[in-house]
Image (cartoon, helix red, strand yellow):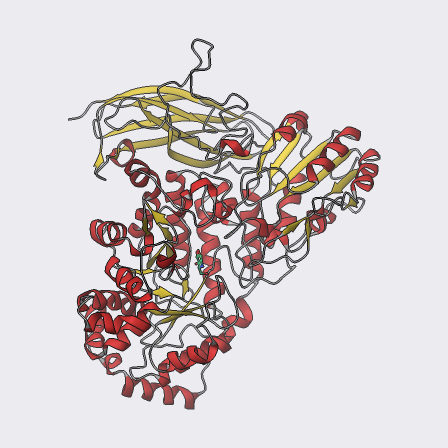
Amino acid sequence: MPHSLPAKLSTALASIMLLASPFTSSASNDIEQRVDELLAKMTLAEKAGQMNQYNGFWEVTGPAPAEGDAKNKYEHIRTGMVGSVLNITGTKDVRATQKLAVEGSRLGIPLIFALDVIHGHQTVFPIPLAEAASWDLNAIEKSARIGAIEASARGINWTFAPMVDISRDARWGRVMEGAGEDTFLGQKVAVARVRGFQGDDLTDIDTIAATAKHFAGYGFGEAGREYNRVDVGTNTLYNMILPPFKASVDAGVASVMNAFNTLNGIPATGDVFLQRGILKGAWDFNGLVVSDWGSGKEMMQHGFAKDLKHAAQLGVTAGSDVDMESYMYVKHLEALVNEGKVDIALVDDAVRRILRLKFKLGLFDDPYKYINEEREATLLGHADHMAAALDVAKRSIVLLKNQGNLLPLSKTSGKIAVIGDFADDKNSPLGSWRFGSIDNSAVSLLEGLAKYRDDIEFAQGVKVVTGEESFVQEITVNQTDATGIDEAVALAKKSDVVVMLLGEHGFQSGEGRSRTDLGLPGLQQEMLEAVYAVNPNIVLLIASGRPLALPWAAEHIPSIAATWQLGSQSGNAISEVLFGDYNPSGKLPVSFPYNVGQMPLYYNRMNTGRPIDKDSNVFWSHYSDSPSEALFPFGHGLSYTQFDYSKLSINADDPAKVDVSVTVKNVGKRAGEEVVQLYMHDKVASVARPIKELKGFEKIELEPGATKTVNFTLDSSKLGFFDREGNWIVEPGEFDILVGSNSREGLTGQFTLSMK
Ligand code: NOJ
């Protein structure tokens, strides 16, 4: 029992547990045996209860269901009809709710408490896309670790993260929640996050169960429209979409969430092929599958289930173990089994998975173990956590352009103006998905800059968002009121350098935030051009949760940096980069386009049969009115120093692997970090391969003048691909290599893979 519980209550609870749950006194520590013992005691209704997950009573992260009134939910928890809950946080409420289940229900099975811990908790880290731009796996793991420490201090033991969906369409709002467009980077980031959340041991009170989501294909919604259908072939499914899930499973992720979308006509929640065939079959996943919010009942809207009972049948048959907010199992599972429509073995399998996780979390040994008021009082927003958030935030900033070395700014001379509605905003930098955060708690850009200089002048310029800033309601953008532009222009005129923070509000990306325009929202472009007309010395900072299309800015503005939504320490992180106390090291995890018409855009595209303009006529794969490539490519990011690449060496003598090495030298005047990237192209294969694919990267740090040799090994796990049946194959033949500082530039080489 936790020491924070009064002794009398501890004793009372202990005896309740002993009486109600003889399994806790089982001599055996073996989880499987304990699961089986408990399962044998459960009625069918209690089994269905374990598969039922309710939303808490205040936070809402989906459409509020009519049936979801608090009174029913309390009663259901008390009678063992609920196995887990989401959106109940804080030791007080978690304890009260857990008490209902443990003391009220016949078997006293504890609840699991889930929450979307996406990028930190009270200490808010950069949005996941931004963190991916750091390409710093240790920093990313630490971010998830701290998210787990803080959330667990509020009684949470399960997060619905990481989102490992690959996303190649910037119109989709949830690009912000993933690791970007690349599968290799996506796998590495997924593993780092799973490790961070789960630590070494799930029974530790500061670790929480992770969820790889959304299985599968959710990031490929047609036209980037939220919840839209996904139609992809096996090539994309096996080679692009599934690997980050597989990597998560291999890293021991406790759960997988299925998805709202249909995949090739089948709602993911009812997809036998995905959940039973691949996840629980081929991959032998023994964790649990949770539905997305109401995705069970949405099978009716999809035109796949005829009613809620049918949805329940389809869900359990397909292997969707926990029903979040559809009420379908708790209402219909008993009847379905009794009528012979659902095999009890399927129900038992689902319940086993749920109980297994509860045992792994240690909840049966102490259902109140995560409820610790002392941790709650001391850990949230801890100074060490803030320091880590600042560290990741700096690493996440991507310097896209720096003509004439306008950056870094001088700490002492020159008049600096700051312009932009977001510059004094303490809320937007917290980004989307930020439960546990305190509104308006981020360090604003102005506050960060003030630590360096006290003579900076500020003009807000045009308002970007009018009305409510809300996670659940649409954001309204100011399209008409140009007030503020004159003031901004006047300030720019009398300044030497103008720092402009423009872009999207944190709630313009995230779930339900698909957009068809990737330019600067509202009147910001107009303001940018007006300011440029009087003072072209502009440092443009882009706030966004997705790639924006800024071709005019890329052509005219001398210095541009992607500053995303960077969380609690946003203003401090940006200021350190602007004044050169941190040398930027981020690289784009997504391609930045010229225009929205290029979507979906990604570097690892196919060659097509007509890739180049040989005859200068129109019959080749291109756009007539736009470049076909990215404006800023995947992997791109500058530093205040320069790196020289030399001595690319490739050794393919060993048929089992290819060794590649390259020498990188810091030829500039400052210490800096570089992400050395290796791309590979399998020139001829039985299934045509992309023109290049990331297969390795290493982030290195070099003092001025210093040199480092970076080694990569391409073994069979990197040299092959999935064929149309989902088999991994490695084929002999010729390969191209590119090793460099982004997906476009570097040293090139070739090798021939000869098989034994
Ligand atoms: C819907 C989202 O798609 C999912 O990612 C999230 O975990 C749930 N809502 C719960 O908030």
Residue 574 position, x and y percent, is: 64, 44
Q: Farthest residue in the top direction?
A: 615
Residue 414 position, x and y percent, is: 79, 35
Q: Farthest residue in the left direction?
A: 756
Q: Quadrant of the C terminus?
A: top left
Camera sees residue 410:
no
Give the camera-side residue of 754 and 432.
432
Q: Is residue 729 above or below residue 444?
A: above
What count of labels does the image hold? 0
Displayed-image quarter of ligand 1: bottom left
Q: Is residue 393 above or below residue 160?
A: above
- Quadrant of the image occupied by residue 746: top left
Q: Is residue 725 left or right of residue 49?
A: left
Q: Is residue 115 left or right of residue 352?
A: right
Residue 72 position, x and y percent, is: 42, 79
Which residue is at 46% across, 35% downward?
600
Q: Is residue 573 above or below residue 17?
A: above
Residue 386 position, x and y percent, is: 57, 56
Give the camera-side residue of 589 and 467.
467
Q: Is residue 540 left or right of residue 662?
A: right
Camera sees residue 310:
yes
Give the camera-side residue of 589 and 11.
589
Q: Is residue 678 above or below residue 421?
A: above
Q: Quadrant of the N terminus?
A: bottom left
Q: Is residue 699 left or right of residue 291?
A: right
Give the camera-side residue of 418 and 43.
43
